[in-house]
């Protein structure tokens, strides 16, 4: 592996999306991520989407994207023999990431106190719905959570939707991926401290906390004015114009809430008199009179196609078409930025796209260089690196503590 994190060893005990997303960020930048799975595998392997000709279905599209650049080892941690192997892996690791329910790692004898006693430099990161005791014991600590739970209790759904009576979950899994990003950030911060002091620490991430942290409108408005924010569609409170507007053949998003942008927009529309109109001459006044702003703006935009609006306003006023997947795959921006790299898919034998790496490092760029692993694909490789010989691995297989390769490979 290449990248800024080459030489960093991560033991990945996560499944679903939040944890694997965190460790995929680390893997993309060169960390050696060893994904430890139970014999049944990460349950996300069984979730689609699947290609029509993928008969074996070793994993679906979500697993493929969130687990690229990793190696897979099978260990049944309920068996003492497998636990002993994991402890050997931890001895040489820099990071361990897990997203089990609260208390599971303690019952397995793999809690932070146990592992840090063996490896004081270890950074131990957990992601749970409501966090662990390290960051403050939540009354919901033992509650299970999914993305929709985090979006609901983290406040995001309360400000998302067409109106106050229709709260809506954001279409992607932000209740998982945002906690994954915060976990990756916290892990890197703790790694930096471990480099300075030789001491690791516990990084405690709650999915609900993470969603709240990016739902800034919820906190800022209430803390300042005691106003409870509600969904207002695609608008942003205090800013106008800032919304979708109609075209002849669809819609575009447009934002010109500040005077320089508003001035340029009015000039392009051929309506310079609106610049100093008392209803619209300040940012605040445009928000107060936003219904009139949008009436005027839509009357102009709906005379033009999306393509014409892009030609008239593109590069002048913040504006964008609303891309779907087909548009994204065809647009030159994403190709130029390498945001749709392709990796082999073992179920089809073809190369298929996954989401690329947003953070572009000039000297040590990350890379998507390895497909997601088959279940147990690297068991023997990793265990030999840990010092186990063939006889020891055979013994582990005999007691069901591990398997050497994916059963459908």
Image (tube, rainbow, N blue to C red):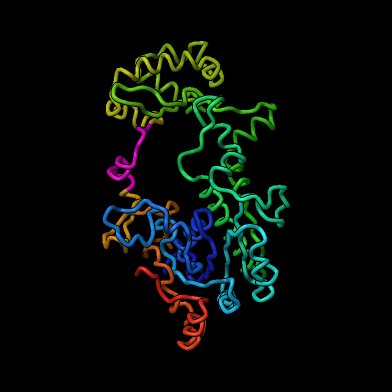
Picture coordinates of residue 393, whole percent (x, y) = 48, 83
Q: Which residues, given as a range, are shown in magenta?
A: 320-334
Which image quadrant is residue 56 in? Answer: bottom left
Horizontal side of residue 347 vs 155, given as left or right = left
Picture coordinates of residue 251, whole percent (x, y) = 35, 26
Picture coordinates of residue 276, whole percent (x, y) = 48, 13
| Quadrant in which the N terminus is drawn | bottom left
Whether residue 198 is visible here, answered yes or no, is no
Which image quadrant is residue 300 in? Answer: top left
Tell me if residue 213 comes above or below residue 237 in the rendering.
below
Of 120 and 20, the residue lying toward us? 20
Picture coordinates of residue 252, whole percent (x, y) = 37, 28
Question: Would you say residue 222 sits in the magenta stretch?
Answer: no
Of 207 and 42, the residue lying toward us? 42
Tell me if residue 382 comes above or below residue 52 in the rendering.
below
Question: Would you say residue 327 sits in the magenta stretch?
Answer: yes
Horizontal side of residue 383 vs 303, given as left or right = right
At 72% from the left and 56% from the top, the residue drawn is 133
At 51% from the left and 37% from the top, the residue drawn is 169
What is the count of numbered marks? 0
């Amino acid at each position: 592996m290449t990248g800024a994190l080459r030489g960093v060893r991560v033991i990945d005990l996560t499944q679903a999306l939040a944890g694997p997303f965190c460790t995929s960020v680390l893997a993309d930048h060169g960390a050696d991520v060893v994904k430890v799975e139970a014999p049944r595998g990460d349950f996300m392997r069984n979730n689609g989407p699947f290609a029509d000709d993928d008969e074996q279905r070793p994993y679906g599209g979500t697993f493929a994207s969130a687990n690229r650049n990793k190696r897979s080892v099978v260990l049944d941690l309920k068996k003492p023999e497998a636990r002993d192997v994991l402890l050997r892996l931890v001895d040489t690791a820099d990071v361990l990431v897990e997203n089990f329910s609260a208390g599971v790692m303690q019952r397995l004898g793999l809690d932070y106190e146990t592992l840090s006693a063996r490896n004081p430099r270890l950074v131990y990161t957990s992601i749970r719905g409501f966090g662990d005791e390290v960051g403050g014991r939540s009354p919901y600590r033992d509650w299970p959570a999914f993305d929709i739970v985090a979006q609901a209790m983290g406040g995001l759904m309360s400000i998302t939707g067409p109106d106050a009576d229709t709260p809506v979950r954001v279409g992607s899994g932000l209740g998982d991926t945002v906690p994954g990003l915060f976990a990756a950030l916290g892990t890197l911060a703790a790694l930096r401290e471990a480099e300075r002091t030789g001491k690791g620490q516990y990084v405690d991430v709650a999915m609900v906390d993470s969603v709240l942290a990016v739902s800034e409108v919820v906190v800022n408005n209430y803390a300042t004015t005691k106003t409870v924010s509600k969904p207002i569609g695609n608008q942003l409170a205090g800013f106008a114009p800032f919304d979708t507007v109609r075209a002849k053949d669809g819609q575009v998003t447009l934002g010109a809430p500040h005077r320089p942008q508003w001035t340029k927009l009015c000039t392009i529309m051929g309506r310079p008199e609106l610049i100093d109109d008392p209803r619209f001459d300040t940012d605040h006044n445009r928000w107060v009179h936003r219904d009139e702003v949008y009436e005027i703006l839509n009357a102009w935009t709906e005379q033009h196609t999306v393509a014409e609006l892009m030609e008239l306003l593109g590069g002048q006023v913040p504006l964008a078409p609303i891309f779907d997947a087909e548009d994204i795959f065809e647009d030159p921006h994403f190709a130029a930025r390498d945001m749709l790299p392709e990796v082999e898919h073992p179920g089809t034998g073809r190369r298929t796209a996954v989401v690329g790496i947003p953070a572009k490092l000039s000297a040590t760029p990350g890379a998507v260089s390895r497909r997601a692993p088959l279940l147990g694909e690297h068991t023997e490789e990793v265990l030999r690196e840990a010092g186990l010989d063939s006889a020891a691995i055979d013994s582990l297989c005999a007691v069901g503590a591990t398997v050497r390769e994916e059963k459908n490979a």
